[in-house]
């Protein structure tokens, strides 16, 4: 059973048109992450939530925003997608405060900007 | 200097071979070490995790961590065509911290 679910799996958006990607989890994990992964590159952390606390990476463009209305859901909003934002977007969760920490990933949303 | 370095490959081996995948890192504060397998167009799937130094074995997979050398390895025994994927190493300093990933090594196992 899928534990971290991302929707949609594939998203095509127009240049400059706002788009929202969603992530839900059934694990009740308190930490949720958004990563951007471009072809043949390591996943790059955009931001993460530790419970309700939002932690933005210093080099994440302002164009990227996130919302976490409750423990189970987290959204990635791209306000004005550019061609360079085409990538796989990965949502991950983890349990902070436990002795063993691992991240569980969703299947990703592949974003195409046209 | 990147936090985590990983040879991107590609690596091509015959079926049944032993595969060795490696990562080095620069931050001595890393305590949690993970290996993920990522098939094309899919999200990473956790394969192995270890805390601090030592070895861990799970079936055909063995993970090794050498903190003194800042070096981690994943060994795959009796490799199968279904093992063909990209293997990402990842590590973190503490629970709830961000995970730092290598760029991934692309592996092809030839039948």
Image (tube, coloured by chain):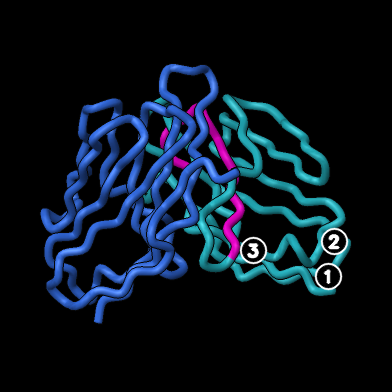
Whether residue A103 is visible to the viewer of this picture, yes or no, is yes
Q: Mark 3 against mark 2, which lies toward the viewer?
A: 3
Q: Mark 1 and mark 2, same subunit?
A: yes
Query: Magenta segment range?
Result: B24-39
Residue A57 vs residue A6, the one in the foreground: A6
Figure disc tally: 3
Residue B41 vs residue B1, the one in the foreground: B41
Mark seen at residue A68: none
Task: Tell me whether the residue at label 1 lies in contact with that at label 2, contact meaning CB atoms closer than 8 angstroms.
Answer: yes
Q: Identify the residue at horizontal 82%, vertical 41% (top origin).
A: B59
Dot 3 falls on a residue whose secondary structure is: strand
Find disc 3 in the rendering and name its residue.
Answer: B85
Left or right, residue B81 beside residue A87:
right
Chain letter for the blue part: A
Chain letter for the cyan part: B
Q: Label 2: chain? A: B
Dot 1 falls on a residue whose secondary structure is: strand
Q: Identify the residue at horizontal 18%, vertical 54% (top origin).
A: A64
Q: Return the x and y of residue B39 as percentages of the image width and height.
A: 60, 63
């Amino acid at each position: 059973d899928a534990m971290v679910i991302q929707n949609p799996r594939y998203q095509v958006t127009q240049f400059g048109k706002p788009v929202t990607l969603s992530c839900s989890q059934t694990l009740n994990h308190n930490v949720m992450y958004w990563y951007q992964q471009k072809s043949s590159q390591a996943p790059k952390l955009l931001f993460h939530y530790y419970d309700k606390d939002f932690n933005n990476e210093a080099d994440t463009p302002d164009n990227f925003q996130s919302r976490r209305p409750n423990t189970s859901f987290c959204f990635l909003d791209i306000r004005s997608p550019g061609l360079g934002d085409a990538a796989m977007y990965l949502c991950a969760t983890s349990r902070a405060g436990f002795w063993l920490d691992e991240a569980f990933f969703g299947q990703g949303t592949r974003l195409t900007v046209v | 200097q990147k936090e985590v370095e990983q040879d991107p490959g590609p690596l091509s081996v015959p079926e049944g071979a032993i595969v060795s995948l490696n990562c080095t890192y620069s931050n001595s504060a890393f305590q949690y070490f993970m290996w993920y397998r990522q098939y094309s167009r899919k999200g990473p799937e956790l394969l192995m995790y270890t805390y601090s130094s030592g070895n861990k074995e799970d079936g055909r997979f063995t993970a090794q961590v050498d903190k003194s050398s800042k070096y981690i390895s994943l060994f795959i025994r009796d490799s199968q065509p279904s093992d063909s994927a990209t293997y990402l190493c990842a590590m973190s300093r503490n629970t709830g911290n961000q995970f730092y990933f290598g760029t991934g090594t692309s592996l092809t196992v030839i039948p």
